[in-house]
């Protein structure tokens, strides 16, 4: 694992990061691990490696959860690359044998056994459109139901590679920033009451002091008053990030992160604009963060045009989906103005 500089150790408490391990030779598992290792994981993280295996027998629907004490005990399901790099990190090994769908077992485990401030990382084959819904993507199922932020790393571009042997593959994934350099993080906001909590959550758990953050938003509402409120919310989001970077005394001025406010066209489909923005930067976006209201059910999400689902399917960058409830809890109590706007939005 690359050495982590002190300037990047920005998180007040060690994070709990779950990594969903697929089949031992799965290209999705290898690629998503390599990307997470180089772009997300820190030496201070407590990493849980979770493998859900479908039982071939047993008439009683049952999940069996086992915690393993050493990577050598997981040699039948843990890729050697992960076993090698995990030894220097605080970690747990969890295997879940289930007669349910693996996605269902993972969701249940996260609901019962996992700290509420944890982050889940999983790979995806990158299925798109109706094929994704008809075939039942595990990552899509988990994102809809798990009560945690979920980071999905797609591997559509490299799914035909027989093995990931070159260290350049991870950093070359869609032209991503090589390890150790500044990341570009795009953060999608709607200008509503959930925007500031999402920024605070990202600052607390994801954004590093050297990141360049692009706030993608359409600060517009149905009325002039709503538009004014949305603009004020975005201004506060920008101020929140600028204060975060300014407080990083260990980081030199030239290496300090930046905040860029990007106004989208409120009259056009925001989903397409988010995906297009990532494409137009030519793969320079290392991570796209979006919030979600937790709309469940594939057909319902498809009909309502979920922004998070659309970005997961089409954005050429890893996508981190943060449930609104998680962001609000991490952000702490809202001030009176935020509460008033939230009640007004709920009434509308």
Image (cartoon, rainbow, N blue to C red):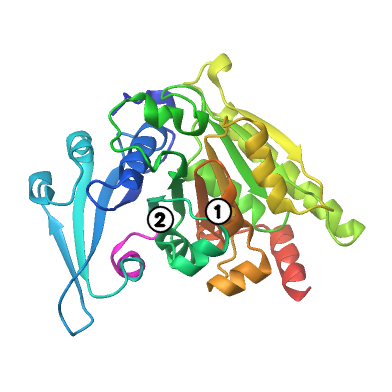
Q: Quadrant of residue 345?
A: bottom right
Q: Is residue 209 left or right of residue 237?
A: left
Name the residue nearer the viewer: 86 or 31. 31
Q: Is residue 289 left or right of residue 276?
A: left
Q: Position of residue 94 (x, y in %)?
A: 20, 57
Residue 112 shown in magenta: yes
Q: For the residues marked 1 and 2, what is the alpha-carbon distance in whole angstroms?
A: 25 Å
Name the residue nearer the viewer: 99 or 14. 99
Question: How packed is label 2: few (under 14 Cα within 10 Å), some, or many (20 or more)?
Answer: some
Q: Is residue 265 left or right of residue 242?
A: right
Name the residue nearer the viewer: 321 or 176. 176
Residue lying furthest right: 224
Identity of the residue drawn at 51% across and 62% down: 131
Q: Is residue 43 visible?
A: yes
Q: Which residues are magenta?
A: 105-116
Q: Position of residue 264 (x, y in %)?
A: 77, 44
Mark 2 residue element: loop
Q: Which residue is mark 2?
A: 117
Quadrant of the rendering where the C terminus is positioned: bottom right
Residue 3 shown in magenta: no
Position above or below: 174 against 196: above
User: What predominant SS class does the magenta segment belong to?
Assistant: helix
Quadrant of the rendering where the N terminus is positioned: top left
Instruction: State the mark number for residue 91.
Output: none
Identity of the residue drawn at 15% across and 58% down: 67
Position above or below: 262 against 306: above
Q: Position of residue 239 (x, y in %)?
A: 68, 37
Identity of the residue drawn at 83% across and 58% down: 221
Q: Which residue is mark 1?
A: 313
Position above or below: 291 against 47: below
Q: Is residue 117 left or right of residue 299?
A: left
Q: Position of residue 249 (x, y in %)?
A: 51, 22
């Amino acid at each position: 694992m690359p050495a982590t500089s002190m300037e990047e150790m920005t998180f007040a408490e060690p994070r709990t990061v779950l990594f969903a391990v697929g089949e031992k030779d799965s290209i999705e598992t290898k690629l998503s691990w390599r990307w997470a290792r180089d772009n997300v994981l820190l030496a201070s993280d407590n990493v849980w490696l979770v493998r859900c295996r479908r039982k071939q027998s047993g008439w009683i629907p049952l999940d069996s959860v086992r915690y393993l004490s050493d990577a050598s005990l997981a040699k039948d399901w843990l890729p050697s690359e992960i076993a090698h790099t995990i030894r220097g990190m605080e970690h747990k090994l969890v295997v879940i044998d289930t007669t349910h769908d693996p996605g269902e077992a993972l969701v249940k485990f996260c609901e019962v056994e996992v700290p509420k401030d944890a982050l889940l990382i999983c790979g995806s084959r990158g299925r798109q459109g109706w094929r994704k819904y008809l075939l039942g993507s595990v990552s899509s199922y988990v994102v809809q139901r798990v009560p945690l932020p979920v980071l999905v790393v797609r591997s559509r571009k490299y799914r035909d590679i027989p093995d990931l042997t070159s260290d350049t593959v991870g950093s070359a994934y869609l032209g991503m920033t090589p390890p150790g350099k500044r990341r570009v993080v795009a953060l999608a906001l709607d200008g509503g009451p959930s925007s500031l909590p999402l920024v605070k959550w990202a600052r607390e758990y994801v954004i590093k002091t050297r990141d360049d953050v692009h706030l993608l938003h359409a600060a517009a509402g149905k009325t002039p008053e709503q538009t004014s409120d949305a603009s004020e919310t975005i201004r506060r989001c920008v101020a929140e990030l600028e204060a975060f970077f300014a407080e990083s005394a260990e980081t030199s001025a030239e290496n300090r992160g930046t905040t860029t406010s990007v106004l989208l066209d409120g009259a056009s489909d925001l989903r397409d604009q988010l995906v297009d923005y990532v494409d137009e930067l030519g793969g320079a976006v290392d991570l796209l963060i979006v919030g979600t209201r937790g709309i469940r059910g594939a057909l319902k999400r498809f009909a309502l045009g979920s922004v998070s689902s659309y970005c997961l399917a089409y954005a050429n960058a890893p996508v981190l989906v943060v449930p609104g409830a998680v962001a609000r809890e991490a952000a702490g109590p809202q001030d009176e103005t935020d509460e008033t706007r939230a009640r007004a939005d709920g009434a509308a």
